[in-house]
Every structure is written in structure tokens, then in C-alpha cells.
Image (cartoon, helix red, strand yellow):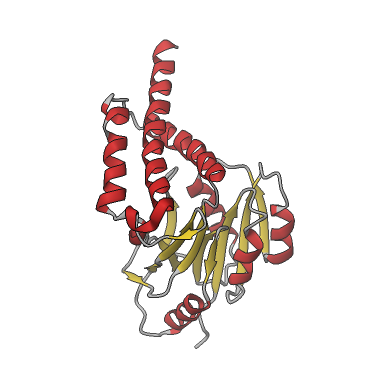
Amino acid sequence: MLEPRLAVLVVARNEEKNLAACLNSARFADERVVVVDASSEDATFEIARRLADVVSVRAFDNFADQRNAALALASASVDWVLSIDADERVTPELAAEIRRRLADSSNTCAGFRVPIKSEILGRPFGFSGTQQDLPLRLFRRDRGRWTGLVHETVAIAGPIGRMEQFLEHRTLPSIRVFLGKIDHYTTLEACDLHQSGRRFQTSDVALRPIWTFLKLYLGKQGFRDGLEGLMFCALSAVSVAVRSWKLRELYLARRAS
């Protein structure tokens, strides 16, 4: 019986510093597919074209549709897909486990959750809530599809397993990048909340950020991640306040129109 074929899917925007290492870590796969955000302003497309098997440029609308576009580009002969971000790396141990689990004829899972170990602000994190990063990233091509405008997830039909090995996630290398992502993601989140009918409440900026910090720094033991953990938890709380304020601005704009 032929071994199942695997495609690695990547979506990328302005990822010239990360994409090559990401795609090189995915060489174990049968196919590498990259969807490049049309607004990329660096060498992301050129790197993808050099190292990937399939490359497409697409205007960004939301993360789920970007990932589903990559899914649609995978060859018809592919049985499984592994979706990763440009700042993530497949470790050799994870690659070997994926191949072993997919080749197992007794495998009945439609998908697998994959643990993630993050490096944030240049430091490996083990707490601050990152210890619970276990997204569904590996699934049978014909069983899953991405849903959700911002924090997208895979809607899947069938049982879900878990990998033991992990993805490396080298994210938020500097405060400048962190603040830029806060601005980008809070805009998307506020728009999503606004479209769903969520209304601004004063407690969203007065109390919820404080609760978020305490939950991450004390409840999730962010203090064990050092000074970087303190900054991560603090800026995560700021992100909650910024998202809520942007929601307020959208609400006021609609009421004034």
C-alpha cells in the first residue's frame, strides 16, 4: 500500500526573514504550497517561488480564506495537509513522527493537534499561557476546512489525535513587531466583534485588561518566563484594551452615520 502523501501549507506576508527556514524545515513533505499576501513588500514571493512547489499571490481578506486558498492549491494526489505559519519550524523529530503516524494503517484519526513551543522576544517560553498551545494543524485533506475571520480554526469531521513532538514558533522578535501585530490583529478582532453585534462596555477597558494580565502572569505563571514574560503578559492586556477601544470607535461611527 502506498504511503499517504502530505502537503505543507503556508500563508505569508512580509516574511522574507522567516520563510526560507520554514520551507526548508518542511522538505520532508511531498509538496509545499505558499499563498503570499498581495500586499507583501519584501522578497517573500521570490523566496516562495524558489523553495516551494506551488505559489500563489492573493489579496488578504481573512486568515481562514487565505488558508483555504492554500488548501485548494494542494495537488489532488495529496492525502494529508499540515498548515504552518512562516515563523514556525517543523523539527526533525516532528517530521519523523508525522511520517510514522500517517503511514500507520491502524490510524483512524481525521486530524492531529500539534504542540507548539514558542520563542517570544528572543526567549523560549514555557508559561504565560503558551503551554496550552495545541492547535489542530494536521488533517486529512478531504475532512477539514478553516473557519473564523481572525482566530481561525479547522472544522473537521472525524476523531482527532495528538502529536507528541512539537512545532517551533519563533514569533514577536521585538517590541516593534509586537506592537505592529497588536495594531493589526486588534483591528481585525474589533471588526469581527462589531459585525457579530457585540457592543462596547466600559468594563472592557477598565477591568478586562487587568483580568487578562493577572490570568497570564499569575494564573498561567508568566512570571516564570522572566522579564520577557512580564512584557508579554502586559502587552497582551494592552491588546485587550486596544481591541475594545477600536470596537467603541466602530460603534460610535455607525451610530453617527
- Where residue 209 appears, as percent x and y from the top left, is 32, 36
The residue drawn where x is 30% and y is 30% is: 204
- Where residue 15 appears, as percent x and y from the top left, is 63, 53
Asked whether residue 154 appears in the rendered view, the answer is no
- Where residue 42 appears, as percent x and y from the top left, is 71, 48
Asked whether residue 162 appears in the rendered view, the answer is yes
Quadrant of res 41: top right
The residue drawn where x is 51% and y is 40% is: 179
Q: Quadrant of the C terminus?
A: top left
Vertical side of 78 occupied by 179: above or below? above
- Where residue 161 appears, as percent x and y from the top left, is 33, 71
**Residue extending furthest front?**
227
Q: What count of labels does the image hold? A: 0
Along the line of sight, which residue is nearer the eye, 174 or 180?
174
**Residue extending furthest top?**
256
Vertical side of 56 occupied by 96: above or below? below
The residue drawn where x is 50% and y is 47% is: 63
Along the line of sight, which residue is nearer the eye, 187 or 111?
187
Along the line of sight, which residue is nearer the eye, 68 or 249?
249
Vertical side of 202 occupied by 25: above or below? below
Q: Is residue 46 left or right of residue 244?
A: right
Quadrant of res 28: bottom right
Q: Is residue 22 left or right of residue 65?
A: right
Along the line of sight, which residue is nearer the eye, 2 or 118?
118
The residue drawn where x is 42% and y is 41% is: 235
Q: Is residue 141 left or right of residue 210?
A: right
Q: Is residue 57 left or right of residue 213?
A: right
